[in-house]
Image: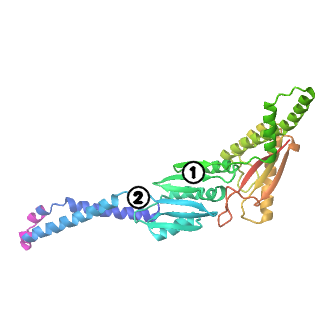
């Protein structure tokens, strides 16, 4: 608890104590027993005095009752428009609105209303900070982050399906009561997929009686099905590893390229996946945020990627199947803060390269 909050609570305590003393004090007995005061005060004066005290008591208690009223929760809406975040909402005053906009890194002011009893919890604000970056970077325009009575709603469409796993890893760190309605983008089939689908339909529906034709179609079917199966298998492996990393990020010892004990367990799970799929190669990609020089970030990311590669090799993975590349700050997936820091951008990814 901050010093200001402690002082405010102490002040309220003294006020309540004084009011309680006034309320419980028996003025009539005091006035009748105190001869010196009773000789100076007539009965009418005594009545006026008591009336004034009762009026003061009623005012104080009515004021305390107002303070006891529950403060109305802050309601606001963050909406993505033209790749920028616009904020609308009800705030206690203009200063608070500006402060919240700065903390959330809002790019555009919307409609502000002011209500003296509006308030926002600090813990809720911390969670909103985590959610604003993916709202801006991962979602399409008109996606929203809404706060209503301290409940948070995230709605919208992702720009790319690959952002789903990254978003899930962020949502795991959010403590607020969050409700989501997130849709994935419609994926258009490329020309190869269209040809494959078309051929599969023909092969399923057409009965081929000619042995030669049947043989040719079978051969063609194998030529088509094999890469389709390989692509499907590759995507399954990639998806499995991505889901694993979304809940268990690869971390390193402070100022070191040595992975932590917890992360060693994650790498062992990935090694097991690779052992079960020996035909596929993998790239370990190291990434950093933008703090520091380009060359230093490249070196750090390369050292950490190489460290993970060595662990995989020590677990029995053929070294010819594993490459390590440090990309430094070249491929951010979130916006760094003003100091160039971003926990999300500091990461290690595993990319399945194929057979």
Q: Is residue 48 above or below residue 306?
A: below
At a point 81% along the width and 59% down the height, the residue shown is 299
Q: Is residue 102 above or below residue 196?
A: below
Give the structural element (helix, strand or loop) at label 2: loop
Where residue 105 appears, as percent x and y from the top left, is 59, 65
Give neighbour class at mark 1: few <14, some 14-19, many 20+ (Cα, 10 Å). some
Give the farthest residue toward the bottom: 40
Give the structural element (helix, strand or loop) at label 1: loop
At a point 6% along the width and 69% down the height, the residue shown is 43
Give neighbour class at mark 2: few <14, some 14-19, many 20+ (Cα, 10 Å). some
Displayed quadrant of residue 313: top right
Q: Is residue 43 left or right of residue 9?
A: left
Where residue 353 appears, as percent x and y from the top left, is 83, 46
Looking at the image, is mark 1 or mark 2 earlier in the sequence? 2
At a point 54% along the width and 68% down the height, the residue shown is 109
Where residue 112 appears, as percent x and y from the top left, is 48, 67
The residue singled out by tag 1 in the image is 174
Which quadrant does the C terminus fall into? top right
The answer to whether residue 268 is magenta is no
- The structure's colour scheme is rainbow
**Magenta segment range?**
29-43
The residue singled out by tag 2 in the image is 72
């Amino acid at each position: 608890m901050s010093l200001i909050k402690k002082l405010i609570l102490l002040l309220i305590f003294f006020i309540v104590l004084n009011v309680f003393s006034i309320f419980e004090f028996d003025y009539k007995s005091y006035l009748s027993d105190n001869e010196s005061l009773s000789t100076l005060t007539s009965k009418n004066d005594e009545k006026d005095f008591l009336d004034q005290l009762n009026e003061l008591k009623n005012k104080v208690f009515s004021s305390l009752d107002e303070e006891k009223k529950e403060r109305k929760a802050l309601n606001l809406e963050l909406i993505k428009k033209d790749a920028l975040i616009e904020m609308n909402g009800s705030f206690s005053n203009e200063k608070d609105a500006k402060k919240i906009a700065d903390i959330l890194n809002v790019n555009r002011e919307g409609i502000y209303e002011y209500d003296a009893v509006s308030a926002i919890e600090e813990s809720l604000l911390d969670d909103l900070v985590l959610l604003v970056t993916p709202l801006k970077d991962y979602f399409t325009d008109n996606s929203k982050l809404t706060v209503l009575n301290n409940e948070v709603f995230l709605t919208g469409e992702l720009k790319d399906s690959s952002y789903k796993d990254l978003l899930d890893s962020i949502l795991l760190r959010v403590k607020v009561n969050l409700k989501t309605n997130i849709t994935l983008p419609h994926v258009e089939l490329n020309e190869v997929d269209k040809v494959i689908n078309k051929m599969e339909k023909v092969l399923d529906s057409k009965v081929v009686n000619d042995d030669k034709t049947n043989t040719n179609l079978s051969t063609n079917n194998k030529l088509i099905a094999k890469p389709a199966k390989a692509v499907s298998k590759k995507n399954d492996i990639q998806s499995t590893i991505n889901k694993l990393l979304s809940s268990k990020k690869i971390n390193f010892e402070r100022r070191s390229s040595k992975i932590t004990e917890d992360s060693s367990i994650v790498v062992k799970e990935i090694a097991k996946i690779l052992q079960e799929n020996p035909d596929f190669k993998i790239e370990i990609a190291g990434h950093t945020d933008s703090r520091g020089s380009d060359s230093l970030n490249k070196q750090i990311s390369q050292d950490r990627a190489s460290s993970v590669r060595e662990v995989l090799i020590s677990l029995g993975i053929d070294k010819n199947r594993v490459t390590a590349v440090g990309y430094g700050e070249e491929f951010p997936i979130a916006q760094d803060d003003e100091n160039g820091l971003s926990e999300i951008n500091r990461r290690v990814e595993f990319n399945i390269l194929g057979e």
